[in-house]
Amino acid sequence: MKEVARLLTVLALSSVALSACQVSVKKAEEKAAPSNSALSQQVFNPEKEGYTLFWEDQFNGSELDETKWKIRGSGPRRIGYNDPSMVKVKDGYLHLMYDIRKDSIMGSAVGTYETFNTTYGYFECRARLQKGIGPWAAFWMQSPLISQGEDPATFGAEIDIFEYFKELGDDHLTHCIHWAYGPNQKSSGARNSTLSGLSEGFHTFALEWTPEKYAFYIDGLKFHELSEGLSHIDQYMILSMEIPSTLEGIKNACAPDTFLVDYVKVYKK
């Protein structure tokens, strides 16, 4: 009888645990996304859409993996400098920093120009944005031929996957396309996105680039889709902490400040 009683108790506890799990899953499924301006509330999953992970960097270790990234544009940048000392890999994150030391205004950038260029895919980073107004975090793609001609299909484009100008609002960022660098430069955007809580914690920022379109995502939600300025050539990725063009632009800045990147992933079909 004791064994029967013990068995009944175990079954009863299992039933309660299973019920609790089901409730938990249901609550998770019902949890709505924060207030946002997305085109759809359906979360995009690249692997469910036929994409396979092709390239990634989790920023493990204590140094920038130079088989994947190189320090970009060391030297003068607007009113300051891109300085290699402002790029660090620590505790599983890429730290892209902005700082003022004595009379030096410093920003930072890394890129895959020398290591990884590709055409089309789903490009995603998970990151925590900078805290201050003035300098801004950016994840973008660039064509090595963009200044050599005006047809984006042939000479490529600058694809600003996101730029975070905090003076526009804590929960607001922009996306933009530029092509034909030079006197006849053209642009599409800036396109604006809002997501409640964007300034806090980590979020994912992504671009789906196909032969037909660019689509821009935050936390898996599609915010914009467009077909202007389409590039059909290999391009490379850039992560940067940008410096404004005027001293007025940094009067409310935080120094030091950091754009903190958890990972970058590229999916291909």
Image (cartoon, rainbow, N blue to C red):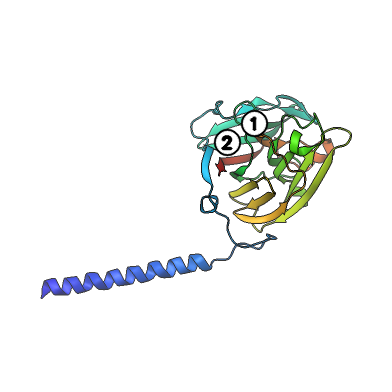
Where is residue 168? Give x, y as percent.
77, 51
Other residues around mark 2 within 10 Å, as few (<14) / some (14–19) / many (≥20):
many
Residue 190's tag is none
Element under disc 2: strand
Taking the spot 63% from the left edge, 52% from the top edge, the residue there is 218
- For the image, the number of numbered tags is 2
The answer to whether mark 2 and mark 1 are in CB contact below 8 A is: yes
Q: Nearer the viewer, residue 17 or 201?
A: 17
Q: CA distance from mark 2 to mark 1?
A: 10 Å
Instruction: Write down the residue under mark 2.
Output: 94
Which residue lies under the disc numbered 1? 110
User: Is residue 47 shown above or below 245?
Assistant: below
Q: Residue furthest left?
A: 1
Residue shown at 71% from the left, 26% from the top: 73
Amino acid marked by disc 2: Leu
Answer with left or right where residue 106 lies relative to residue 267.
right
Label 2 vs label 1, nearer the camera: 1
Q: Is residue 181 above or below residue 192?
A: above
Residue at the outermost top position: 75
As displayed, is residue 118 above or below residue 102?
below
Under mark 1, the amino acid is Val
Q: Is residue 142 above or below residue 8?
A: above
Q: Quadrant of the C terminus?
A: top right
Q: Secondary structure at mark 1?
A: strand
Could you tell which of marks 2 and 1 lies nearer the N-terminus? 2
